[in-house]
Image (cartoon, rainbow, N blue to C red):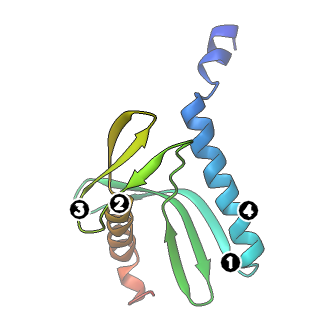
Amino acid sequence: MGVLDFVKKIPTANEMQGGLGEQLTKLMSKIDMPETLVLHDVLIDGKDENTSQIDLLLIGLNGIYVVEVKHFMDAKIYGDCKKDKWFYYKGKNKYSIYSPYMQNKNHIKYLKTFLSEFGDVP
């Protein structure tokens, strides 16, 4: 592997921030729920030819928990669970993102479809 190949594998600042948020969530979930299996970055192929990338799945004695992780440094986030678009403000700039609530709702739908042969998994 040459130097250029190595440089291409260095994550961007955004990738590192997102990864840090996921790792912190994973660590906290292990502390708070020691009998829980934690899987991160789970990719599920849907029957509609789309995929769903779930940040964290917590598989516990009472069911499966689906966790969406967002990490925004120094930002204020505003959203409504009934709307697809949320906004965050960083400094004087306004940005829109797809609703993490709706995103997680879709993850749950994909997961339930994927696990449908096992009955109604809570």
Query: Mark 2 Cα within 10 Å, few/some/many (few <14, many 20+)?
Result: some
**Answer yes or no: do the residues labelled 3 and 4 have beta carbons within 8 Å?**
no
**Residue at image location 36% in from the left, 65% down from the top:** 101
State how far apart marks 3 and 4 are (Cα).
31 Å
Question: Which quarter of the image is occupied by the N terminus?
Answer: top right
Q: Horizontal and vertical percent for residue 2?
A: 69, 9
The quarter holding residue 96 reads top left
86, 8: nearer the viewer: 86
Provide the residue designation for mark 1. 36
State how far apart marks 1 and 3 are (Cα).
32 Å
**Residue at image location 30% in from the left, 68% down from the top:** 81
Provide the residue designation for mark 2. 103
Query: Mark 4 Cα within 10 Å, few/some/many (few <14, many 20+)?
Result: few
Provide the residue designation for mark 4. 27
Above or below, 4 against 14 in this view is above
N-terminal-most mark, 3 or 4: 4
Above or below, 59 against 49 in this view is below
Above or below, 92 against 42 in this view is above
State how far apart marks 4 and 1 are (Cα).
12 Å
Q: Secondary structure at mark 1?
A: loop
Residue 83 — which label? 3
N-terminal-most mark, 1 or 2: 1
Q: Is residue 112 left or right of residue 31?
A: left
Question: Which quarter of the image is occupied by the C terminus?
Answer: bottom left
